[in-house]
Structure formats: structure tokens, C-alpha cells
Image (cartoon, grey):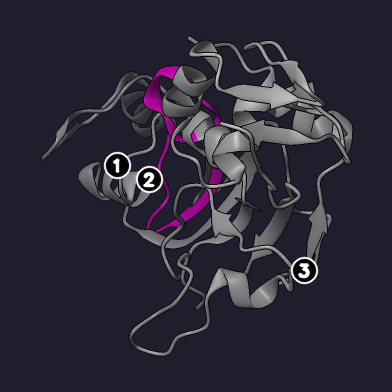
Amino acid sequence: MPVRLNRYLAAAGLGSRRAVEQLIAAGRVEVNGEPAGLATRVDPGDDVRVDGLPVTAEPLRYVLLHKPAGVVTTSRDPQGRPTVVDLVPSAVRLFAVGRLDAETTGALILTNDGALAQRLAHPRHGVEKVYLATVQGTPGPAIARRLAAGVELEDGRTAPARVTIVRPGVLEIALHEGRNRQVRRMCEAVGHPVVALHRSGYAGLTADDLAAGAHRDLTAAEVAALQAAPDG
């Protein structure tokens, strides 16, 4: 699948998306012997050169993992715990987009596309994250409304969320923020600490059709949808 030139150069390790766009704008990049522009796309087998020197990028890969409990969202762990990259054999180095704490399960994207990862993680894009939270006690409609309206945390008031009571003691919470351990802190703030937490959706993707620990590569259409997300 063709990729934008800035994404290709970033994947080759030539710098951030902004840095490689400066290389392109300065006329230092050629594709198949022709000067390249910001709109240039690169197909497999194209000859890409910067200052006359060939550039080879790793093929981009996009993986959806159903993260199990007890696995950390890092590339390696000093404590020797299993990591999400251990669960996804890959010829290219992958990293997780965002974080789930060790005991949270559910949808997690792994990729080597740094530009897309930055885009999805940046707060201004408001990527939706949907969680099923099993909590202590039986929160009613008043608690759901408090969570939906926003609650005060030590790092400020949370943005409005979509909150549904799925069944007694289980809430579905959809966020467009990405603060550290946000759902757990929100539920504790209203007196219903989380017992178990599962991310059922991320950016419109769900891993609930995968067994815990299983993964699949995203389709071209799914990748295109992620890349086409509005800039906010």
C-alpha cells in the first residue's frame, strides 16, 4: 500500500514528521529520480533518496492486540514481566500506541508508524476510548451523570464523557481524553473503585472478537480510517 513520503521518511528514522517535511520542502528528496513534494506517495520498490543517498524504510505494520491482564504496555520491563511486544512476533520493531496499565485488558494498537501513533495519542484529535468498568457497589443514574459531566481529579476536572449503566456494578465509559489511569481515578472519585477494567473500543476498533493475548493485523481500510481522522 502506498504511503505518504513524510511517513516513509519518518519510518526510516530521518526524524519527526515536521523534520522530514522540512527536508522535502528544501528539495533534498527525490523519488524515482524526480524531485518530491509533500503530497508524494511512495510505493513498494520506489527509489527514495535524500541528498542523493538511498533511503530504505521498514515496512509499516499495524496490529490490534487483545491485551490480557498481567502484561505491561512497554517494549521491555526491568522487573521481567511479560510485555505486549512479546505477544506479537514481528520482523519489524513495534511499539504500543498509548498505555494500558498492567491489569487492564482489551484493545491496544501496536505499530512502527510513529507519525500515526503521535496523531492518535495527541489530545486535540479526541480519539474515542471505550471502557467497561466493573466497580465496587452499585452506581445508579446519579453517579453516571456525575461521571458524564466531569469529576474533579488532582490534575483537573475531566472532560464530559458518555456513561451508561450496562448492568448492576458495570459501567460503560467512553472518553476522548487519555490521562493516566483516568477511568480508575474517576470511579474512585465518586466512591465506586474499579474492580476490573476492560477497553472494549479504541478509535472505532474492538478486539473483543479476539481471545485474550491474540492479535491480528489491521486491514488497509482500517488503517486508512485511522489516518483520515480529523485534525480537531
Q: Using the image, determine if residue 136 lies above or below residue 156.
A: below
Instruction: Tell me the magenta residue range.
Output: 121-140
| Whole-percent x, y for residue 51 in the image | 56, 31
Q: Give the CA distance from mark 3 to mark 2.
A: 24 Å
| Whole-percent x, y for residue 70 in the image | 50, 78
Between residue 70 and residue 55, name the one nearer to us: 55
| Whole-percent x, y for residue 120 in the image | 53, 32
**Residue 214 marker:** 3
Q: Amino acid at mark 3?
A: Ala
> Which residue: 69% across, 63% down?
92
Q: Is residue 23 visible?
A: yes
Between residue 56 and residue 172, name the one nearer to us: 56
> Which residue: 38% across, 25% down?
123
Is residue 131 inside the magenta stretch?
yes
Q: In this figure, which residue is indicated by the disc labeled 1?
A: 186
Q: In this figure, which residue is indicated by the disc labeled 2?
A: 183
Identify the element where label 2 is drawn: helix
Identify the element where label 1 is drawn: helix
The reply, left or right, for residue 1 in relation to residue 75 is right
The reply, left or right, for residue 194 in relation to residue 230 is left
